Structure formats: structure tokens, C-alpha cells
Image (cartoon, rainbow, N blue to C red):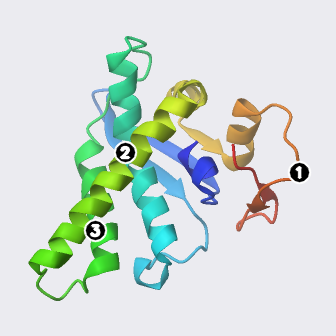
């Protein structure tokens, strides 16, 4: 849902269970051939990916806070935060250089902005997120088309951007 809202094309989403039948915290988004090197991305694309990374923990927190308790918690929030921090660092400082105080302050400001953006995105789209999360818990993998159909049964081809993997239009919801 975050990818759809943020205009990040993807092919499918997969979650895995550990041997004790708990979620291991790894949700795999298959972005296809969209370029995996954040150093080649625009600032906006990096911030969108960082926001998307933080939406899982925000959704779990929202689910627990408002006593929906239908989304099984996982242990992935720490790795999601590390990914968001890594992405934001790519904006401000080459990875092989020491971070200056000014860069650290700028990175912190971006992390705070992205965290707030994730919370707002989850709050505004929670019912859609819950539908997708419950379907993923049952099936393990959902394709782009299945997610779009699940949250928007009647899609309009008039809005959105091209879906990179399939050539279809990516709806912004």
C-alpha cells in the first residue's frame, strides 16, 4: 500500500514464517529492474523508499495502539529502520566517508520527516493496509495486480504512472 501511495512500482510482496510459525520480520518486495543502487536515485525516490521501509512498523504500532490486533507482529522493525537510515545517509554523505556534525543533523531531520510521513500514510490508509496484511498472512505472496484488486476493486486506468515490470499503470491511492 505504501508503494502504491508513494508511486514505487513493484511486482509482488512476499512474507515468510520462521519454523515456529511466527513472522521472521522479512517482507520481500520485488521491485523488478528498477535499479537497486540508491546512489543513482533522486532524493525524492530515496525518501520514498525510506518512508516505505518505515511503514511496516508504523502499521504494527497503529494496529496495536487502536486495538485492532489483527496484524501479526514481526521482528523486522529494526532492519527497516536500518534500511531507512542507510538510504538517507546515501543522500548526505558517501558511505566511505566520516559523517560530519552538519550531515548528521541533516540526516536526523530527514529521518524524522520520513518517520512522520510513514505514520501519516499508515493512519490515512490503515483499512487498506489491514486488508493487504491479512491476505498476506493467509497466502504468503501477493502480486501487484492482486493487491490493487484487493484495495481498489474498480481501478481506473486514467491516473497513475507506468508500472515498470509490466507496463501497466501504477495507481496512486
Tag shown at residue 116 = 2
Check disc 3: other Cα within 10 Å, few if <14, some if 14-19, many if 20+: some
Residue 149's spot in the image, x, y percent? 76, 36
Give the residue displayed 88% in from the left and 51% down from the top. 157
Proximity of marks 1 and 3: CB atoms separated by less than 8 Å = no
Q: CA distance from mark 1 to mark 2?
A: 30 Å
Residue 132's spot in the image, x, y percent? 58, 31
Q: Nearer the viewer, residue 70 or 125?
A: 125
Q: Nearer the viewer, residue 21 or 77?
A: 77
Point out the tag, 1 or 2, that comes first from the N-terminus.
2
Tag shown at residue 86 = 3
Instruction: Name the mark nearer the viewer: 2 or 3.
Output: 2
On the picture, is 93 further left or further right than 55?
left
Q: Which residue bears the numbered disc 1?
A: 157
Looking at the image, can residue 129 be seen?
no
Residue 122's spot in the image, x, y percent? 48, 35
Instruction: Name the mark nearer the viewer: 1 or 2.
Output: 2
Amino acid at each position: 500500500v505504501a508503494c502504491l501511495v508513494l508511486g514505487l512500482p513493484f511486482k509482488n510482496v512476499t512474507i515468510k514464517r520462521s519454523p515456529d510459525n511466527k513472522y521472521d520480520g522479512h517482507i520481500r518486495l520485488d521491485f523488478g529492474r528498477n535499479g537497486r543502487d540508491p546512489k543513482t536515485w533522486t532524493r525524492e525516490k530515496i525518501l520514498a523508499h525510506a518512508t516505505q521501509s518505515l511503514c511496516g512498523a508504523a502499521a504494527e504500532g497503529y494496529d496495536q495502539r487502536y486495538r485492532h490486533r489483527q496484524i501479526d507482529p514481526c521482528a523486522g522493525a529494526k532492519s527497516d529502520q536500518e534500511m531507512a537510515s542507510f538510504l538517507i545517509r546515501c543522500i548526505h554523505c558517501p558511505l566511505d566517508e566520516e559523517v560530519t556534525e552538519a550531515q548528521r543533523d541533516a540526516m536526523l531531520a530527514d529521518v524524522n520527516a520520513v518517520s512522520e510521513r510513514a505514520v501519516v500514510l499508515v493512519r490515512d490508509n490503515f483499512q487498506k493496509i489491514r486488508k493487504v496484511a491479512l491476505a498476506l498472512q493467509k497466502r504468503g505472496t501477493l502480486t501487484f495486480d492482486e493487491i490493487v484488486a484487493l484495495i481498489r476493486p474498480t481501478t481506473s486506468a486514467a491516473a497513475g504512472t507506468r508500472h515498470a515490470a509490466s507496463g501497466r499503470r501504477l495507481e496512486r491511492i
